[in-house]
């Protein structure tokens, strides 16, 4: 089994497969849309249709790549934001739990001294 196919601790294999399938579907969709776009231009020669189809596919994939990069960047931003909020919440919860434990211990100590 190659290193690429070994499952990592964070689901790297699943992410790689999902990314591959997503990009493959995007390519297939771009090719289908390019064929449909060129079919309406029946006055073009075969080589002209092929060139327009190629340019359409290239443009579609360039736009899709930019969209995916923007989405990935936003996902990283959201992850960082949520991790920051989670750490703050965790600190508050631990602080509250320690306060409750200290108050409970003080109350029990006072009751035992009386």
Image (cartoon, rainbow, N blue to C red):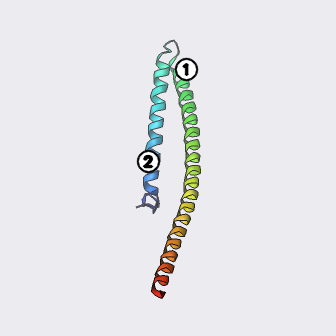
Q: Secondary structure at mark 1?
A: helix
Relative to 111, is 48 on the left or the right? right
Relative to 67, is 15 on the left or the right? left
Q: Position of residue 7 (x, y in %)?
A: 42, 60
> Neighbour class for label 1 at 10 Å: few (<14), some, many (≥20)?
few
Q: Position of residue 39 (x, y in %)?
A: 46, 18
Question: Most extreme residue toward the top, as rendered?
Answer: 43
- Please tell me whether residue 49 is drawn above or below residue 77 in the rendered image: above
Question: Most extreme residue toward the front, as rendered?
Answer: 114
- Residue closer to the observer: 112 or 101: 112
Instruction: Indicate which disc, 1 or 2, sits on the residue closer to the N terminus.
Output: 2
The residue at the point 48 percent across, 84 percent down is: 109
The residue at the point 56 percent across, 32 percent down is: 58
Q: Secondary structure at mark 2?
A: helix
- Please tell me whether residue 94 is drawn above or below residue 64 in the rendered image: below
The residue at the point 46 percent across, 60 percent down is: 10
Q: Which residue is identified by label 2?
A: 18
Q: Which residue is identified by label 1?
A: 48
Between circles 1 and 2, the one closer to the viewer is 2
| Total count of labels | 2
> Neighbour class for label 2 at 10 Å: few (<14), some, many (≥20)?
few
Question: Most extreme residue toward the left, as rendered?
Answer: 1
Q: Position of residue 37 (x, y in %)?
A: 49, 21
Task: Determine the CA span between mark 1 and mark 2.
Answer: 35 Å
* Disc 1 to disc 2: CB gap under 8 Å: no
The residue at the point 58 percent across, 58 percent down is: 84
């Amino acid at each position: 089994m190659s290193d690429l196919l070994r499952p990592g601790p964070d689901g790297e294999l699943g992410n790689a497969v999902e990314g591959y399938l997503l990009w493959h579907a995007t390519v297939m969709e771009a090719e289908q849309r390019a064929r449909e776009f060129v079919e309406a231009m029946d006055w073009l020669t075969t080589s002209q249709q092929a060139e327009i189809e190629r340019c359409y596919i290239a443009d579609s994939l360039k736009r899709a790549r930019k969209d995916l990069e923007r989405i990935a960047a936003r996902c990283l931003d959201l992850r960082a934001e949520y991790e920051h909020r989670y750490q703050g919440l965790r600190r508050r919860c631990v602080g509250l739990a320690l306060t409750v434990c200290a108050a409970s211990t003080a109350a029990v100590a006072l009751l035992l001294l009386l």
